[in-house]
Image (cartoon, helix red, strand yellow):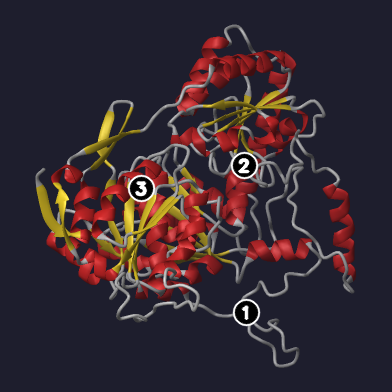
C-alpha cells in the first residue's frame, strides 16, 4: 500500500481538503477552510500545516468563540451543505469555543472544532494552561466539549486519525445527527510524523440522503389530514435545511392549509403567499396564534417544538388536537405523541401532496385564514409607521430597514428584544432571507454569524440587527470583516441596556432591576444614576468600519441607502424609544415568578403567573 509520511496536522488538512458532499446530483467541497487563533498548542502543528499549504484558506479571528459563530452562520446559510473547521490553542483558547459548540449542536449545524490539547506523552506536564486532576491524568479542559458535541475524540496517536476522521464526517454530514464535532489534538501529536495510507487522502463524496417515510406512517398521516377540519402547518428550520420551500408552497396552495413559521423556519414561505400566516408561539402573530389555538391537526415540519414555538405548551388548546411530525430526526418526529414521518421534508411533502388529490380545507376556514392575514398585514403597516414623537420606536426602525432591503437580502439577529419583534414583523421574501439564531439565542453571534452568511453567498446584502448590549459583548470581529473584505451592514439600536430582559423583569414585577446601562448612584448605591455614555460611532470607526449616526427615521433611511454604496462594513447607530413596544398577540411564555416575596409587584405577578400556567398542556 502506498503511503505518505506527513505530520498528523498535515494529514488532517489533506483529508479535509478532499471531502465533498452531494445532494440532488450537485457535488462540491464540504470545507471552506479554517478559522482560528494560533497559540503554543496549535501553532507548530495546525499552524505549520496551514502555512505549508496555502491552498486551504486560513482566516484569523479575534476571539475563538466568534470564530465558531462565523462557522455556524456559514453552515446555516449554506443549508448545512458546507462548513468551516475552527482551531485554537489549549486552555482558554479552547474553552472559548465551548459556547459556539453548544450553539452549533443545539441548532444542528456542522462545525468541526480542532482545539489544541495537553502533551500526550505527559513527561513535561503540567504544561502551560493545563488543568490537572489528582484522580486521573486522562482529563483536561477539552473534556468540557463532550456534552455540547455530537462526536468527540482525543487523538493520542497519529494513526488514530485514520479511524476518527470518517466518523467525524459521518456526523457532520448527517441530516439527523448533525452538530459540533470536536477532535482534541495534543500539541506534541500534531507535530508527529506517520506513514499514512494514500487512500486516506483520496477524494471522498458523502451523500446527503433524502430519507423516505415508511408507507404505513404516510397512510396514517394522510388519513389524519383528510379527517381534519382546522389543520395548521408549523414550518421549522428543517424546511429550509432540506430546501423544501417550493414543495411547501405547492402543498399549501393545493390544500389551502395555513402555514405558521418558527424562528428557524421563518422564510419557508414568502410573506405574501396566501397561506402564510407568519410567526407562531410566544413571539407569534395574531393569525398564527388564533389558528393554533383552535387547530384540530398540527403538521410540524422540521421543528423541535421549543417553548417559544409552543408558547410553553399553551399554543394548541383544541381538546381533540392531533399532530403529524415530519422530521429527519426520529427524536423530534415522535414529540407531542405525533404520527411520525421520519423523512426528508421535501420528499414527505411531495408524497403527501400526491396522496391528497381533491383535498382542500373548507371555505369557512379558508375565509377565516384570509381575513386574519389581511388584518395582520394592516397591523404590520401600522407598526412600521407609528410616527412616534421623539426617538423612533423599534418597530419603525424595522420598517425602515425592511423598506431599504432588497428581495434577496438577508436580515440576521440572535438575541435581545429584536428576535421577538422581527419574528412578528419582518416580511421575508426569499428562503434564507431571515437568519435568526434562536436555538441558543446567543448574544455576540450576530456580527460573526453575519460574516458567515455573507461568505456563504456574497451576492446577498447582509443586515445585522442588534442592540447595544450585544454589540458591547463582541464588536471585535468588525476588524476581521475589514481584514477579509466581508462587507456587512450593522444596524445598532441604542436603548441603553438590555431592553428584552428589562421588559421581562418588569413583567415579573421586578421593575427592570439591573438591566439598564446607568452609573452607580452615590446616594442609593444602586445602578440608577445617569445613563452611561458610549460613543458607538467612534468605537466602530476605531475598528475600521464606516460609521453613521441616525437621530431620526429620515436620517436612518438615508444612512441605509448610503451604506449600500460603501466599500466595507458599515455601522449605523440609532437611538430608539424603549417605552414603545410591539404587543404580544394572545400568547405567553413560561418564566417562573418568585413564589414568595415581600414585594407587592412580584406577588401580583405571581398571581397572574399561576393563572396562566393552568393553560399548559401535555399532548399525550
Coordinates of residue 523 in the picture (x, y in percent): 74, 92
Rate crowding at label 3 as few (under 14), some (14 to 19) or many (20 or more) other CA atoms within 10 Å: many
- As drawn, 333 above or below 473: above
Q: Are marks 3 and 1 in contact (CB under 8 Å)?
A: no
Spatial separation of the CA atoms under disc 2 and disc 1: 32 Å
The crowd level at tag 1 (other Cα within 10 Å; few <14, some 14-19, many 20+) is some
619 or 526, which is in the foreground?
Answer: 619
Q: Residue 366 location in percent, x, y?
A: 68, 19
Percent position of residue 169, x then y: 34, 44
Which residue occupies the extreme top position in the image? 358
The residue singled out by tag 1 in the image is 531
Q: Which label sits in the foreground, 3 or 1?
A: 3
Which element type, helix, strand or loop, lies under badge 3?
helix
Q: Which residue is the site of mark 2?
A: 381
Determine which quarter of the picture holds residue 494. Answer: bottom right
* As drawn, 269 above or below 510: above
Q: Identify the mark nearer the N-term, 3 or 1.
A: 3
Q: Is residue 57 above or below residue 128?
A: above
Q: Nearer the viewer, mark 2 or mark 3?
A: 3
Q: Secondary structure at mark 1?
A: loop
Amino acid at each position: 500500500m502506498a503511503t505518505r509520511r506527513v505530520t498528523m496536522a498535515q494529514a488532517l488538512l489533506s483529508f479535509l481538503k478532499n471531502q465533498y458532499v452531494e445532494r440532488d446530483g450537485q457535488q462540491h467541497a464540504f470545507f471552506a477552510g479554517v478559522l482560528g487563533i494560533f497559540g503554543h498548542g496549535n501553532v507548530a502543528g495546525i499552524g505549520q500545516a496551514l502555512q505549508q499549504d496555502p491552498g486551504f484558506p486560513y482566516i484569523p479571528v479575534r476571539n475563538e468563540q466568534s470564530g465558531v459563530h462565523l462557522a455556524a452562520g456559514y453552515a446555516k446559510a449554506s443549508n448545512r451543505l458546507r462548513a468551516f473547521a475552527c482551531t485554537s490553542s489549549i486552555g482558554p483558547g479552547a474553552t472559548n469555543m465551548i459556547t459556539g459548540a453548544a450553539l452549533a449542536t443545539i441548532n444542528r449545524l456542522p462545525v468541526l472544532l480542532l482545539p489544541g490539547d495537553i502533551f500526550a506523552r505527559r513527561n513535561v506536564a503540567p504544561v502551560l494552561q493545563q488543568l490537572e486532576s489528582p484522580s486521573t491524568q486522562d482529563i483536561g479542559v477539552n473534556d468540557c466539549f463532550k456534552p455540547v458535541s455530537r462526536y468527540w475524540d482525543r487523538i493520542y496517536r497519529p494513526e488514530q486519525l485514520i479511524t476518527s476522521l470518517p466518523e467525524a464526517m459521518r456526523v457532520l454530514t448527517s441530516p439527523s445527527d448533525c452538530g459540533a464535532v470536536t477532535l482534541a489534538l495534543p500539541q506534541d501529536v500534531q507535530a508527529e510524523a506517520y506513514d499514512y495510507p494514500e487512500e486516506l487522502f483520496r477524494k471522498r463524496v458523502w451523500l446527503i440522503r433524502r430519507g423516505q417515510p415508511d408507507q404505513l406512517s404516510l397512510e396514517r398521516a394522510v388519513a389524519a389530514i383528510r379527517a381534519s377540519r382546522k389543520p395548521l402547518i408549523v414550518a421549522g428550520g428543517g424546511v429550509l435545511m432540506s430546501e423544501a420551500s417550493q414543495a411547501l408552497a405547492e402543498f399549501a396552495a393545493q390544500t389551502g392549509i395555513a402555514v405558521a413559521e418558527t424562528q428557524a423556519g421563518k422564510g419557508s414561505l414568502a410573506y405574501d403567499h396566501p397561506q402564510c400566516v407568519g410567526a407562531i408561539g410566544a413571539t407569534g402573530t395574531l393569525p398564527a396564534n388564533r389558528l393554533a389555538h383552535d387547530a384540530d391537526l398540527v403538521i410540524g415540519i422540521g421543528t423541535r417544538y421549543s417553548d417559544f414555538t409552543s408558547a410553553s405548551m399553551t399554543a394548541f388548546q383544541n381538546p381533540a388536537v392531533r399532530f403529524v411530525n415530519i422530521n429527519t430526526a426520529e427524536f423530534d418526529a415522535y414529540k407531542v405523541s405525533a404520527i411520525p414521518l421520519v423523512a426528508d421534508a421535501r420528499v414527505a411533502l411531495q408524497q403527501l401532496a400526491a396522496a391528497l388529490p381533491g383535498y382542500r380545507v373548507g371555505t369557512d376556514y379558508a375565509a377565516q385564514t384570509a381575513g386574519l392575514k389581511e388584518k395582520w398585514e394592516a397591523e404590520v403597516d401600522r407598526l412600521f409607521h407609528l410616527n412616534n414623537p421623539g426617538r423612533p420606536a423599534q418597530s419603525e426602525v424595522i420598517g425602515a430597514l425592511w423598506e431599504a432591503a432588497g428581495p434577496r437580502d438577508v436580515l440576521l439577529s440572535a438575541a435581545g428584544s429584536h428576535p421577538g419583534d422581527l419574528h412578528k414583523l419582518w416580511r421575508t421574501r426569499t428562503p434564507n432571507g431571515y437568519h435568526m439564531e434562536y436555538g441558543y439565542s446567543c448574544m455576540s453571534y450576530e456580527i460573526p454569524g453575519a460574516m458567515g452568511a455573507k461568505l456563504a453567498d456574497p451576492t446577498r446584502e447582509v443586515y445585522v440587527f442588534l442592540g447595544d448590549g450585544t454589540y458591547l459583548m463582541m464588536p471585535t470581529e468588525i476588524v476581521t470583516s475589514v481584514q477579509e473584505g466581508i462587507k456587512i451592514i450593522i444596524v445598532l439600536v441604542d436603548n441603553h441596556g438590555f431592553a428584552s430582559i428589562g421588559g421581562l423583569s418588569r413583567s415579573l414585577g421586578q421593575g427592570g432591576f439591573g438591566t439598564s446601562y446607568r452609573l452607580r448612584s452615590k446616594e442609593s448605591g444602586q445602578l440608577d444614576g445617569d445613563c452611561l455614555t458610549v460613543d458607538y460611532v467612534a468605537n466602530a470607526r476605531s475598528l475600521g468600519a464606516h460609521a453613521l449616526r441616525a437621530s431620526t427615521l429620515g436620517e436612518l433611511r438615508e444612512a441605509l441607502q448610503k451604506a449600500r454604496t460603501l466599500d466595507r462594513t458599515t455601522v449605523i447607530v440609532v437611538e430608539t424609544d424603549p417605552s414603545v413596544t410591539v404587543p404580544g398577540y394572545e400568547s405567553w411564555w413560561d418564566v417562573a415568578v418568585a413564589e414568595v416575596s415581600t414585594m407587592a409587584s412580584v406577588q401580583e405577578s405571581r398571581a397572574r403567573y399561576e393563572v396562566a400556567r393552568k393553560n399548559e398542556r401535555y399532548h399525550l
